[in-house]
Image (cartoon, rainbow, N blue to C red):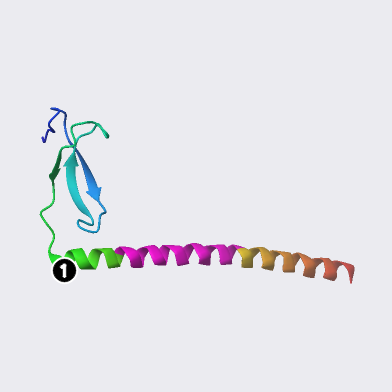
Amino acid sequence: MVRCWCGKQAITRTSWTSANPGRRFYCCPDEGSSCRWIGWYDPEMSARSRMIIPALLRGRNELEERLEVAIGDVWKWKIYLVLRLILVLIVYALG
């Protein structure tokens, strides 16, 4: 069990800074307290990891954005097709 300078049990968080992307660390559970203690859970990353991980995260974020747009397009097409089907049924019923 890891304790901070306050004597409280430290919690684990993940750093998403460019210097330590994805690296886990211990910190004081009282966010904003004067303790400000941190200790690294994971070992230091290699220079290559620090280069690759941010690029992978950017790529994943771009793919998530594209997926959201595609899902919106699918809903538009579904609505369009349902309306077209209703129109065809109305024309067929009247004709």
Residue at 41% x, 67% y: name it: 63
Q: What stretch is highlighted in magenta?
A: 57-75
Residue at 16% x, 31% y: name it: 9
Which element is circle 1 on?
Answer: helix
Residue at 15% x, 28% y: name it: 6
x, y percentage for residue 94? 89, 68
Q: Which amino acid does label 1 sit on?
A: Arg
What quarter of the picture does the C terminus occupy? bottom right
x, y percentage for residue 83? 73, 65
x, y percentage for residue 53? 24, 64
x, y percentage for residue 5? 12, 31
| Residue at far right of view | 95
Q: How many labels does the image show?
A: 1
Q: In this view, does 57 lie to the left or right of 49?
A: right
Observer-nearest of 1 and 29: 29
Observer-nearest of 91 and 76: 76
Magenta span: predominant SS is helix
Q: In this view, does 8 lie to the left or right of 75?
A: left
